[in-house]
Amino acid sequence: CFAPFTLVKTNQTFFMIGGGAEEDPAIWQFEGTAFKKISTLAIDQVLASYSDDELETAFSFYHGYKGHYFVYFTLPDYTFIYDLSNNYWLERKSTINNQQVRFRVNSMTTAYGLLWVGDSLDGRIGTLEAQELGEYGEDIISQWSTMPFGNYQGFSAPRLELTAET
């Protein structure tokens, strides 16, 4: 295992960042009686850019929110989130002094009907709410990517409409 603090258990299975001898690291899910690689090529490239010492500082945690279940993988510069409900990957960042850094939340737990979080910068404990537009006084910035359109040739569009379920 490349990252011992990334082994995280959910209700059904467990996940980790690891790999075999002479293999690059990847994110794995235990399924049935074997491990299944679930990380994308882009995530694998990020993992491969870290040294063994940097990977050993990575950690994971798991939580559920409104019918979705998430596993967070926090690395020195990135936080990747796997949504078990629909098998999607997300990346979460925080903004500090107008600079984006890895998600500053180190831990989460639910108590008293709230989602409580521990801050990595100053140890603060706060709550995380879906309708909140900021994080410790800084705006939350969102970016999206989509599949390529058509045959990869350039095009221009006079209008673009985005429909999203948040």
Image (cartoon, grey):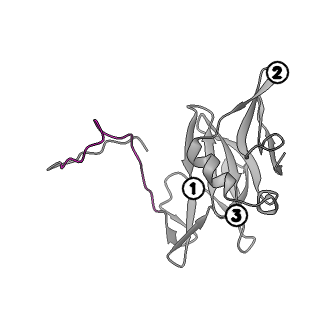
The residue under the point 70% across, 73% down is 121
Nearest to viewer (mark 3 / mark 1): 3
Q: Of callouts 3 and 1, which one flags the residue occurring earlier in the amino acid sequence?
A: 3
In which quadrant of the rendered image does the C terminus lie?
Answer: top left
Q: Is residue 86 left or right of residue 147?
A: right
Q: Of callouts 2 and 3, which one flags the residue occurring earlier in the amino acid sequence?
A: 2
Dot 1: element: loop
Magenta segment's dominant SS is: loop
- The amino acid on which the numbered mark 3 sits, given as a three-letter code, is Pro
- The amino acid on which the numbered mark 1 sits, given as a three-letter code, is Arg
Q: Is residue 79 left or right of residue 143?
A: right
Mark 3–mark 1 distance (CA, rounded to whole Å): 13 Å
Residue that carries the numbered disc 2 in the rendered image:
33
Dot 2: element: loop
Residue that carries the numbered disc 3 in the rendered image:
76
Q: Of callouts 1 and 2, which one flags the residue occurring earlier in the amino acid sequence?
A: 2
Tell me the number on the disc at residue 92: 1
Mark 1 neighbour class, 10 Å CA radius: few under 14, some 14 to 19, many 20 or more: many
From which residue to which does the magenta span run? 141-156
- Give the percent coordinates (x, y) of residue 48: 68, 53
Q: Nearer the viewer, residue 5 or 34?
A: 34
- Give the percent coordinates (x, y) of residue 113: 67, 47
- The amino acid on which the numbered mark 2 sits, given as a three-letter code, is Thr
In this view, the residue farthest toward the left is 158
In this view, the residue farthest toward the front is 22
Mark 2–mark 3 distance (CA, rounded to whole Å): 31 Å
The residue under the point 51% across, 71% down is 138
